[in-house]
Image: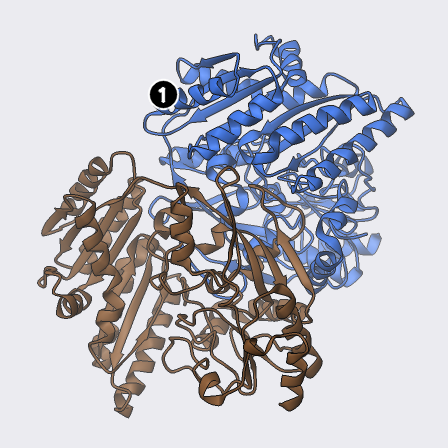
Chain colours: A brown, B blue
Amino acid sequence: MGELIEHLREGLPAEAILTDPDVTRSYANDMASFCTAGAPAVVTLPRTVEQVQHVMRTATALRVPVVPQGARTGLSGAANAADGCIVLSLVKMDRILEIDPVDRVAVVEPGVVNAVLSRAVAEQGLYYPPDPSSWEQCTIGGNIGTASGGLCCVKYGVTAEYVLGLDVVLADGRLLKTGRRTAKGVAGYDLTRLFTGSEGSLGIVVRAVLALRPAPPQQLALAAEFPSVAAAGEAVRQIMARGHAPSLLELMDRTTVRAVNAMARMGLPESTEALLLAAFDTPDPAADLAAVAELCTAAGADQVVPAEDAAESDLLLQARRLSLTALEALRPATMIDDVCVPRSRLADMLEGTAEIARKYGLTIGVCAHAGDGNTHPVVCFDPADADEARRARESFDAIMALGLELGGTITGEHGVGVLKKEWLARELGPVGLEIQRGIKRAFDPLNILNPGKVLDA
Amino acid sequence: MGELIEHLREGLPAEAILTDPDVTRSYANDMASFCTAGAPAVVTLPRTVEQVQHVMRTATALRVPVVPQGARTGLSGAANAADGCIVLSLVKMDRILEIDPVDRVAVVEPGVVNAVLSRAVAEQGLYYPPDPSSWEQCTIGGNIGTASGGLCCVKYGVTAEYVLGLDVVLADGRLLKTGRRTAKGVAGYDLTRLFTGSEGSLGIVVRAVLALRPAPPQQLALAAEFPSVAAAGEAVRQIMARGHAPSLLELMDRTTVRAVNAMARMGLPESTEALLLAAFDTPDPAADLAAVAELCTAAGADQVVPAEDAAESDLLLQARRLSLTALEALRPATMIDDVCVPRSRLADMLEGTAEIARKYGLTIGVCAHAGDGNTHPVVCFDPADADEARRARESFDAIMALGLELGGTITGEHGVGVLKKEWLARELGPVGLEIQRGIKRAFDPLNILNPGKVLDA
């Protein structure tokens, strides 16, 4: 360990190297529950590309594992420390280098907070859509690492669709430039997309060229109350089949609605089995909402309440954004799942999850990016109760099994990390796993980049 | 060769194996000029995944190169045969397996023609945007291989953005499934995107899940005449900076306009230096066109002519679609370049190309996907004139050098193939090239998949 610190000091200033165990311990975990985490040997906080290169050269020379970190808001343990690792925190590399309204790109360092970028581009009439729930804290580097989603994806897609080019420091410290800042480009294999969602296991993103869009009009929302998740699922089917392009189409189940009311007295309808929120940022959102209201009613909605204005719309959105926090408050602990199914199977997924909750005798609240078929079942339990904790883990697995059975994926936007690596093998199958491991070896032959995550058994 | 055919016959019906040299020779080339092509040993036309697997197992067992082909409309020689190779033509695998309006996906075999799919989904109120110029002939498999673009990309993006999941037969015949049919998914590395644009060098796509969109309203177009390419470039800057979302923003230079008139008597304005075509498929296209017309006038347009209706709009579009054919008719041969620059540098690219034409004493017509900064300079020359042919090749290279200098890429949508592999090395740099070759080795250790293309020196 003395050698490691000494080596790091040759290329990093003193303030960029943290070794006090009380401090380094605070970098051990992201926000995932029940994922193993080790004790870092050192935390590094580089401010330049060269400093990141020095960290990776050091790690390669001494065969020390490196765990890259952003804001550690991840939900799969992908940023959890490994014993004796170098934590490579990118939060000090937080400059927005450029915003160009003609090329519609932003060039940023990885530590820029999502909300900071979103606000900066908004000032120029531009829009950076990806909006994970943690957008006020999470970093662009972390968003790229997990290929994060958010609420806007049903219309605007996920982070991956906004990453045009990257500068990446490789495991051995070499600097690789991928992609482009042009609107199109097909020169060579798409390495940009390969790094996006690779959870820090292939290289360290130190700079990103991001695509921007023109700012859309302010969105207007409605809330529709359904007597069953099946009816809400049918409404989602109809809305999408009729060619609507909502900027948001979210669902909260009864448990979630009540949890949000309990936490924030939002006055949401407690008798509803499923509350569907839809929004449009089109030129005439009221007309679109009226059409969607009709479809909701035809699908069996008890009541449809359109927001009067942007402020009311924001309130609805705020209720949705509170869901996870509200569900977390129900029991001492939660496990948040992230299963995405074809949107035509949404109701099957919700009904199956309710059945799983009954079977295991647990509270499982579900909020969902309904338009994407991306559900977040939140298993609420008490870890001090061994039997309940076992049931929680089993129900969590049963939810993923159900997702795969319905033609879905074990993770729509949170990533694999530590939490789901056994399930990844199941989703990919033996050929997929072998091919993916071949790619990992091509980038990281010494297996020093975020070992024990994603594909690493 | 006897052994090869015998081996192929064990898993393919007689009609799927072509060995007559007069026939196999006709499969030697795609539509690129001046790219080397060898004589295939055999052409195979499988109809099933198992048959493709048999071809690849045979190729691996006997170490025979395989060249996958679609409609051979490519412009970079990526589908050109290698001497003694197996041509693996996917055109008989041409079934549309599914179109789902709720999940907004189509599942297709690789030999489906782009226009056939586009029309089939349109019948269900859906839209498959990618529209390469060859859309009436080219196949989805070929589109995936080159990550093709088209006219609609400025609003709807390129092929890569519509490929959700793939079934791929690997070099050794194993079947790999990548991606998903869900709207979102981040389980493992994004292999779907890695195969898209890999020009048949990593595996054989045998099935694709494609994302669809709701059909937009019929687009309405205008034509604006500019006294200089600089003025047209400024109009493009303003249109994009003001947040407009045209469904088409195309440019034809003076040479192209005259060539189209000469071929089809379209009555385009011959005195213009640059004709800009803009279209909108928004709810109120006339209003959007009026705003764009104003920006064009402010940027110096001599005249702006809005189409009266959809029929007139189609006529303008048809003129643009004729550009390449019309330029090809000017001289015995052409070389079509495909340089994409940041759209803010479009005018620089166009002026630089005109300068190159003067310097080399050649006719170079340019049509461009202006909104994407993607230019197609077409070098017109007589290959029988050795000096002119040399100048043509040099000017073609000078155009790519200019593109890189302006922060662009050597290929926006046509791919690398044989034509640009030396330039790919230049664009990627030594680290990029080495990493990309590592990926190629991981998928194709025997280098039997489309050897001599893309990265293969």
Q: Residue at x 38, y 75 (%)?
A: A31
User: Residue A72: percent from the left, percent from the top?
Assistant: 43, 72
Q: Which residue is mark 1?
A: B286
Specify whether residue A429 is in view. Answer: yes
Of helix, strand and loop, which one carries label 1? Answer: helix
- In the drawing, does residue A127 fall left or right of residue A47? left
Count of numbered badges drawn on the protein:
1
Specify whether residue A222 is in view. Answer: no
- In the drawing, does residue B270 fall left or right of residue A143? right
- In the drawing, does residue A103 fall left or right of residue A191? left
Q: Amino acid at mark 1?
A: Ala
User: Residue B195: percent from the left, percent from the top?
Assistant: 60, 53
Identify whether B306 is placed above or below A128: above
Q: Quadrant of residue A135?
A: bottom left
Q: Quadrant of residue B192?
A: bottom right
Identify whether A301 is placed above or below A15: above
- In the drawing, does residue A360 fall left or right of residue B295? left
Q: Residue at x 17, y 43 (%)?
A: A309
Q: Residue at x 40, y 52 (%)?
A: A118
In the foreground, B328 or A192: A192
Identify whether B331 is placed above or below A220: above
User: Residue A82: percent from the left, percent from the top?
Assistant: 52, 83
Q: Quadrant of residue A292?
A: top left
User: Residue B259: percent from the left, percent from the top?
Assistant: 67, 14
